[in-house]
Image (tube, rainbow, N blue to C red):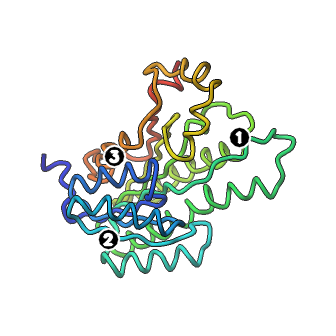
Amino acid sequence: MTLFDLTGHVALVTGGNSGIGLGMAGGLVEHGADVCIWGTNPVRNADAVAELARHGTRIHAVTCDVGDEAAVTAAMAETLEHFGRVDSCFANSGVGGSGTAFIDTTLADFRRITRVNLDGAFLTLRAAAAHMVERGGGGVLVGTSSVSAIEGAPHNQAYAATKAALIAMIRGCAVELARYEITAHSVLPGWVETPLAAPTLATEGFQKVVKRRVPMRRWGLPAEFGPLAVYLASGAGGYQTGDSIVVDGGYSIF
């Protein structure tokens, strides 16, 4: 019980107002953590704060576009002013691909995706790591990648490229920051019922073709990422760092 007691722990979750991010935040607060969520939608931020605050820990939301360097700097400053520290950072913010054929993908659309999924993750993780190094005492960095990083992703190459790059970034952080007692991991979700993915998952094609490739024969749920977030934030893994943790119901191995 005490191994996963996060009382006094401060976690930052970007994209924490819905989907997998909110699922992670929910697990963290259930185990006693204080949580700061960053999101671009003030209404969703407020709704998430109200939902998470029911558990009795400190919850705060910051409106932040993670693809904007100045916005990330300001958001981190506000987070630290409110909580005094950040012990774990979950870089979860992301946007989906356009579903455009590769040869028809414009550079503008490619950069629309990399701006949030890659630049945003870099800016967030860099700000959190800088604080952890300066503060001392270690910390945890987690990046939400995707199984598209390890599976072929037709009509979605830009998105897949950002998620593969995030894995590489996390591994580099794991090696470089280990001397500061900072661990780093990436999480690779499969098909999960999030607001972003739900319309696609509901189509007849996905129901007939894709779901058959999932050994568990169902889509994942955002709440199922809560326990994993708790495990990673707790530091219970000890010597474990640099892992790419796949959570996909067996999709990528079937």
Please tell me the numbered disc located at residue 226: 3
**Crowd around label 3: few <14 · some 14–19 · many ≥20 (10 Å):** many
Task: Pinpoint residue 120: horizontal percent, then vertical percent.
Answer: 58, 62
Q: Eyeballing the image, is 250 above or below 125?
A: above
Q: Amino acid at mark 1?
A: Asn
In the image shown, does 174 or 193 lie closer to the viewer?
A: 193
Which residue lies at the image location 71% right of the left edge and 40% below the top edge? 156
The answer to whether residue 154 is left or right of residue 130 is right
Which label sits in the foreground, 1 or 2?
1
- Helix, strand or loop status at disc 2: loop
Q: Eyeballing the image, is 16 above or below 97?
A: below
Task: Pinpoint residue 135: horizontal percent, then vertical percent.
Answer: 33, 74
Dividing the picture into quarters, in which one does residue 205 lie? top right
- Cα–Cα gap, marks 1 and 2: 40 Å
Q: Which residue is mark 1?
A: 156
Dividing the picture into quarters, in which one does residue 82 lie? bottom left
Q: Amino acid at mark 2?
A: Gly
In the image shown, does 249 or 240 lie closer to the viewer?
A: 249
Q: Are marks 2 and 3 in contact (CB under 8 Å)?
A: no
The answer to whether residue 170 is left or right of residue 37 is right
Which label sits in the foreground, 2 or 3?
3
Please tell me the numbered disc located at residue 136: 2
In the image shown, does 11 or 165 lie closer to the viewer?
A: 11
- Cα–Cα gap, marks 2 and 3: 26 Å
Task: Pinpoint residue 179: horizontal percent, then vertical percent.
Answer: 38, 60
Q: Amino acid at mark 3?
A: Gly
Q: Earlier in the sequence, mark 1 or mark 2?
A: 2
Q: Earlier in the sequence, mark 2 or mark 3?
A: 2
